Amino acid sequence: MSTLHTRDLIINVPGRADGFSLNLSVEPGQTWGVLGPNGSGKTTLLHTLAGLLPARSGRVVLNDSLLIELKRRDIARQLGLVFQERQDSFPATVMETALIGRHPWLSPWESEQADDQAKAQQALAALDVDHLSDRLLSTLSGGERQRVAIATLMTQNPDIWLLDEPTNHLDLHHQVKVMSLLRDQAELGKAVFMCLHDLNLAARWCSHVLLLYPNGDACWGPAESMLKPSALEQLYNQKLVTVEADGAPVFVPVNSG
Amino acid sequence: MTRSLLVLGAIALAAFMLALAVGSVTITPSELWAVIQGEGNKLHQTLLLELRLPRTLAAFATGGLLAVAGALMQVLLRNPLADPYVLGLSGGAAVGALLAMLAGMGALLISGSAFAGAMLAMVLVFGLAHGTGSWTASRLLLTGVVVAAGWGAVITLMLAITPSYKLPGMLYWLMGDVSYARTPWPAFVVLVLAILVIMPLARNLNVLARGPMQAAALGVSVRPLEWTIYVLASLLTATAVTTAGSIGFVGLIVPHMLRLVLGNDQRIILPASALAGGTLLVLADTLARTVIAPEQLPVGVITALLGVPTFLYLLHRSR
């Protein structure tokens, strides 16, 4: 089980003042939701936490090691990321796509074995896309591709899961399925850290919330202490009405027009 | 996987036999077997061992080098239509070779000069595209295309000021001609070494084909890998160009056709490209020296005439 810490981290959003530095502890069992309007740096933060972008200052610590001192392969065994945007220039099947999740676990001369195939198959089944395993990725709908990307992360099976808008393009029932899958994984000892657009998904499924403001300010903590209407109204510059449904708060924008 | 490579190997062997048998003097399989065993008549021995075999080996190695270089470039740029020729490497090599020819240098210096030209083209394209730090595939591709156009202009200028008695040799070289090959062995050694270097990296290349960010997230050290591919592809191109001049389309068509049939696993595509590229050039060269015998065509004309329609057909069918 791995833990991801940040020490006085300032992410590098071009043209923005430093703002508030982040001292996060993402621990096994936690499900983090990152909320903030467009351009507040959610994706930049995820990429910085994965070591794909340099921080402006501060450090990212994976267990007891500085992230920048680790080899990419060692990072990939402990931490994985689902990107918001994916490029595929060459045709590839769904199964091939899921199987590349095994890459960090295989040595250069090794090829994928039955065991790796089984892991990929299992992950595809968990995301309801196993029936598509022989289809070309380019023939799938946006939601199906999103689920294949999450299945690839599940095949990679790192301790820390970073996800950029995992519910993008998903139908309502698949949103619920993906969010509960992520929470179940956290309960099994993973640490889940995801950017979300939907306040109500965060309120329903996340144990911890990080609010990122466009000016670089931030606050974070357990979900119930963060999801206060006043803070959220300031975050999105939008009046909200709070109701309670099915045991969780639901935030509805006020129709001010 | 192994089966498709075996099939390609068998086809390559058959192409070799055909190339050895066909020509001004036809050699039957039994006569061929006699020569292999060190028997047969003197004429056949000389013809096979000193003329046809080296030429066929040179054609095979050149084709393999070009196809593997193309396959590597396509993964590097994540563009199935990229190849070392598009990026201007062969243009640089051609300018180097023509300069040496213009100065009346010997064969060895022409080879060396072509090699230096290819490397210069690589540094130029890579340096310009890399310039300010952001190095995107489209930027590299565009830089390569523009630099290739520049080499083309330099070549035209050099041809315009060349005394006419030197022109035929230069033109043949520009169009690609295996009969210029002195010895096939350097090309062969480079091809085999390159495959040995690249095979352990082949799964990394599969991941890199998904984009550099995704590859980094899956544990690939992207920048060192990209440099390795670029240097390797340039080396392969330079070796091919110094062996047989500028032969186009092999690097573009062979990997593309193989991908349509075998999928895009580099662990298969790279060795398959070496075999299929070699086979294609052996067949094309056999055609080049027999179709209007006793005259010979430059093999680059054959690859272009075969390659362009095949490529267009495949592109049309795959849509």
Image (tube, rainbow, N blue to C red):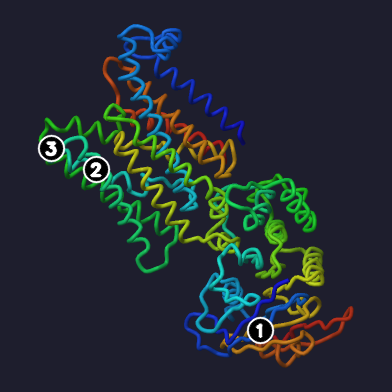
Residue depicted at x 47% and y 52%: B76
Residue depicted at x 20% and y 43%: B156
**10 Å crowding of disc 3: few (<14), some (14-19), many (20+):** few
> How far is mark 2 from mark 3, CA to CA?
14 Å
The chain under label 3 reads B
Give the amino acid at mark 1. Leu
Q: Say whether marks 1 and 3 touch (CB < 8 Å).
A: no
Residue depicted at x 54% and y 69%: A52
Q: Which x, y percent locates residue A9?
A: 57, 84
The image's mark for residue B219 is none
Which comes sooner in the sequence, label 2 or label 3? Answer: 3
Quarter of the image for residue A85 reads bottom right
From the viewer's perspective, is the residue at label 2 or at label 1 nearer?
2
Q: Nearer the viewer, residue A28 or A136?
A: A28
- Disc 2 and disc 1 on one polypeptide chain: no
Q: Residue lying at the far left in this picture: please name it.
A: B163
Give the labeled residue for mark 3: B104
Give the SS element for disc 1.
loop
Q: Is residue B300 above or below residue B210?
A: above
Give the labeled residue for mark 2: B112
Q: Is residue A167 above or below residue A135?
A: below
The chain under label 2 reads B
> How far is mark 2 from mark 1, CA to CA?
58 Å
Quarter of the image for residue A71 reads bottom right
The image's mark for residue A24 is 1
Q: Which x, y percent locates residue B90?
A: 31, 44
> How far is mark 1 from mark 3, CA to CA?
70 Å
